[in-house]
Amino acid sequence: MNEPTPLILLVEDEPQMRRFLHVALEGSGYRYLEAPTGKEGLALAVQHRPDVILLDLGLPDMDGLELMLRLREWSQTPVIVISARGQETDKIGALDVGADDYLTKPFGTGELLARIRVALRHADPLATEDPVFVLGRWRVDLAKRQVLVDGQEVHLTPLEYGLFTTLIRHAGKVVTHRQLLKEVWGGVAGAQPLYLRVYMAQLRHKLEETPSHPRYLQTEPGVGYRLKTDD
C-alpha cells in the first residue's frame, strides 16, 4: 500500500507568501493547508494533524512563539519557522521553545523543500498524538487548555496548568523535582521543591476526589511526582 502524501500546514498572514508556497508545495506533490492567523492554524493542526508545519512568527493575533508553545503542549509535529526575523536571538528563541528548524525570509524554494524532506525523515512514524487526554473523571483538551472533572470545567492557574500538563506529557513515568522546576518554572532563580509541594497540593484539591489520598497525582518520595495511569 502506498503511503499517504505528506500534508503541510502553513501558518502565515502575508497573502503573497501564501500564494507562493501554495504553488511551490502542491507543485512538489504535497497536500497543503493554510491559515492566516495563529488561532486558525492551531485549529487546523488539531483537526488535520499535518506532517509538517511552516510557521511565521509575525502573526496578527499572537506571536508565533506563543503558538509554538501551544502546539508543543500536545504535539511533536515537526515545525519549520519561516520568518523575516534573522537575528541569532530570534533563532535561538524559536528553537528553545520547540521549533525543529528556522528559515530566514527571503529563501529559495529548493532550500525549503530540502528542509521539509529532512523534517519528514526525522518525524516519528509511530507517534500518535491526541490533544484530548482522558483519565478517570478527567478530560483535558490540551489544544483548548480546558480541564473538565465529571464534565465540569475546573479553572487552573497558569502554573497549576503547566505542572499538570507536564505530568500528562510524561504520564505513567516519574518526573523529578529538577525536571518539573525546569519545565514549569523555566529555571527561574530561586525556584525550589517547596513550590512543587504547594502547587501539587492545590492541584490535588481541585482535581482529586480525595486530595489527602490522591489516586492519580502520586508523590515519589525524595524523587518527584508521577501521574498514575493504571488502576
Image (cartoon, helix red, strand yellow):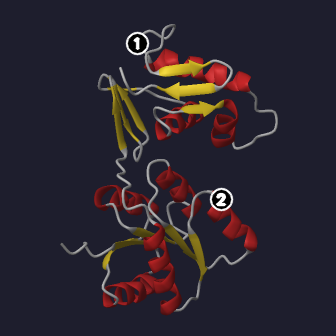
Residue 40 image offset from top left, x and y in percent: 38, 61
Q: Is residue 165 left or right of residue 1?
A: right
The quarter holding residue 121 reads bottom left
- Identify the residue shown where x is 37% and y is 46%: 131
Q: Is residue 70 left or right of residue 198?
A: left
Q: Residue at the front extreme?
A: 1
Q: Is residue 74 above or below residue 41?
A: above
Asked if residue 141 shows in the view, the reply is yes
- Identify the residue shown where x is 32% and y is 22%: 137
Residue 196 image offset from top left, x and y in percent: 66, 25
- Identify the residue shown where x is 46% and y is 56%: 76
User: Which residue is labeled 1 in the image?
Assistant: 209
Residue 147 image offset from top left, x and y in percent: 40, 32
Q: Are marks 1 and 2 in contact (CB under 8 Å)?
A: no
Q: Amino acid at mark 2?
A: Asp
User: Which residue is labeled 2 in the image?
Assistant: 96
Q: Is residue 76 left or right of residue 183?
A: left
